[in-house]
Amino acid sequence: MLKIIDAVRSVVSEDEVASEALRQGLLNLSAYASQILPQVENLTWKSVKKPTIVVALSRLAAEFHSAPSLLCPLKLDDLHVKSPLTVYSFEKTMANITHLRQLYKQLNNTPNQFVAATQGSREITLIVPAEFEGQVAAFFSDKPKAVFSNSVGISVSFSDQYLSVPNVIYTILGTLAVHRVNVIEVVSTYTELSVIIAQSDLELATRALRKFLR
């Protein structure tokens, strides 16, 4: 069981939109108090009045105002597009792991091409230029779990100083989320992040991310 102010703090902290609005002084305290009233009562195990929550939010405003923004002040060094790409997802079996190794040796991979392979606990994802679709089909006898054709990759690069800065990836993906861009895959290296999206979202996504360029 929590005190009311602790319960309100917990609810707001888990609501990224509300916490940012409270930090900036833009949150409608009365309307938000009505919205979270049931949650606060569940956390405190008692009946709570709406004005009491409003008072708690008012007291928490200074605390949230001093917190850093969820979005970091990001400056990108470069942005480039790789297309067309095809994304494959296979079951992770010993046979498919072997096929992946053999395929990787055969791909005509150059510095300007985008080729990525990731292995999870259950699946293998392979991202290759569309021109390699025939080679993928030749090496993998299993039917893929999913295939995403007509895909493109947007790669952004940044200084290694951002490796110790929280929310860099959140800032990039959050910007795409605001514009309802569906991210199919995410691939990262030391100072580069690549998002794989549908070709139809390319213009919108590129325009959204360009604001971070130096």
Image (cartoon, rainbow, N blue to C red):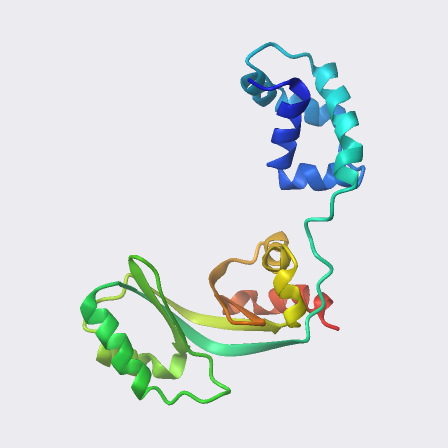
The C terminus appears in which quarter of the rendering?
Answer: bottom right
Which image quadrant is residue 10 in? top right
Identify the residue at image location x=74%, y=43%: 67
State the image coordinates of residue 31 (x, y, percent, origin top left).
Answer: 72, 25
Vertically, is 117 above or below 65? below
Please state which of residues 103 and 85 is positioned toward the viewer in this rendering.
103
Could you tell me residue 116's position as x and y percent? 41, 74
- Position of 135 relative to 176 (above/below): below
Q: Nearer the viewer, residue 197 or 14?
A: 14
Q: Residue at x 71, y 63 (%)?
A: 74
**Residue found at the far top of this picture:** 47
Q: Is residue 40 left or right of residue 53?
A: left
**In what quadrant of the picture does the N terminus appear?**
top right
- Counting the numbered discs, the total is 0
The image quarter in which residue 3 lies: top right
Which residue is at 60% across, 55% downward? 170
- Which residue is depicted at the point 63% across and 61% down? 164
> In this picture, is 65 found above or below 205?
above
- The x, y position of residue 79, in whole percent, is 63, 75
Q: Is residue 155 left or right of residue 53?
A: left
Q: Please indicate whether residue 186 sits to the left or right of residue 180 in the image.
A: left
